[in-house]
Image: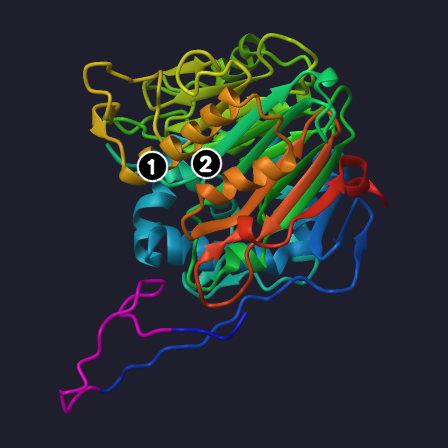
Amino acid sequence: PEPFGWFTSTPGGSWDPIDLTQSNATDCDFSLRVPAIFAREDKIVKHGALRWMQGLPVLQLWGTTEERGFAHGYLVGRQIIDFFEFYVIEENWDSAKQYEDTFVPFLEDHFSCPPEFLKECDAVLKGMRASGTDMHVQLLERDFNRTDLLAINAYIEKRAAFPEAETSSCTQFAFWESQEKGTEQKGGLIAARNMDGECDVRKVTVSHFLVYAVEPAESGRKRWISTMWPGFVGTLSGINEEGLYSMENAGGSGPGPVPEGLVPCSWIQRIILEKQGRDASPDSVLQMMKPFACSTGGITAAGSIILWAVPYNDQESPAFVYEGGRTGFALRNPTDVRPVDPKNIMASNHHLIYGFDPYRPDDSLGNPVSFSSRWRYETGMHTLEAWSRQDKSMGRDEAMRLLQQVAHGTTEYSVIFLANERRILIAVDDLKTDMWDAPYREWIEFDFEELFEK
């Protein structure tokens, strides 16, 4: 990334104008800063390794909670602080003061994080210090701490910190066919997602994109991969070794009080990926999510739309969508809404079951659905329905085409998962000073096991 900066009247704030017609236009200092990219050579510690595979950085972590957390912090400590400063403060909160005055108290007073999550966070911090990482956060003029690490893992929960909040823009699809249909994938399920909207001006969500390959030592826990950024103990884009897929889109949370007793959605998704597998069902997933409900009744009070999917072996519904807000939730199955084919499902950023009023179909939770979310859903829906009418066999090329159709210049990375084959395709945007066009970039393919090779 290039060194970059701008004039602002408040640390971490957006740029302020300078009137050059004024003779006293002085004191307009600004600093040029540059994110610290991942080391190009392999870095290895006792329970982790940072490696480059086919041009992408892969963080392999294995061992107990504390061992994995320590290795995580030790290997990417500087990049954790980069992501925190340049994305969470500058982009997400647009001001160090707003972050300190609003988000820090919200994180400290309104969350009820599981002990296992906090234990791993503390281990990450310990690893960062042991590696010699400079913990000073320039924008805050203090050291990085546990609350700041929670802010990374709970950045989407910003939407729950206010009585009402806007949504963002991601799109997902899943489609499946019987093995005997003879597509290039020999049948099975394919799930695909565009990660949209985390678009900071420095493109740190591109330069610091990271593939996690996590191998828990705890009994009964499954290995999982995550496509996120440094500092994430949980995940919003994860897949486990048995083919369970869980990825989140921003949805409306609806009006209401600021909730208490929140648990980061990223942790909820991660713990389910560790404990459930190819037999996961709408009921089994929901039963694991319910204990994380907050004071206002919702499980994901920020308003989350999560696509869950498993390998297809002729079961009735290998994919479903969880829709949740601050006061409730619902599950959506393939035949509940269009597209009409019972062998595909999709999601953008508005609820179609939870909070839906058939007399006001253009609203979600009482608010108008954004043009972007409606446009992306309509585009994908009509394409899927047309392919269904033509009895078109669908594979990875169709998944790529769908993601390109609904991209609109804000996609920092894209993922396609061939669930039955356990193969992952990833495309990441470049660092050019233009829009974010990940699904049009080169697709890099991995076998699930390949990401765990020591």
- Tell me if 179 is positioned left or right of 249 in this view: right
Q: To which residue does mark 1 refer?
A: 375
Quarter of the image where one finds residue 217? top right
The residue shown at (68%, 43%) is 212
In the displayed orientation, state which residue is furthest to the right. Answer: 454
Residue 447 image offset from top left, x and y in percent: 77, 38
Q: Local crowd at mark 2 within 10 Å, few (<14), some, or many (≥20)?
A: many
On whether residue 149 falls in the magenta region, the answer is no
Q: To which residue does mark 2 refer?
A: 171
- The segment highlighted magenta reads 6-25
Circles 2, 1 touching at the beta carbon (< 8 Å) = no
Quarter of the image where one finds residue 156? top left
- Tell me if 167 is positioned left or right of 78 in this view: left
In the displayed orientation, state which residue is furthest to the front. Answer: 390
Q: Nearer the viewer, mark 2 or mark 1?
A: 1
Report helix, strand or loop for mark 2: strand
Residue 230 visible in the picture: no
Report helix, strand or loop for mark 1: helix
Q: Does 356 sit above or below residue 226?
A: above
The residue shown at (78%, 64%) is 41
Q: Does 172 sit above or below residue 80?
A: above
Q: Quadrant of the C terminus?
A: top right
Closer to the camera in the image, 191 or 106: 191
Q: Amino acid at mark 2?
A: Thr
How far apart marks 2 and 1 lie (CA) works out to: 11 Å
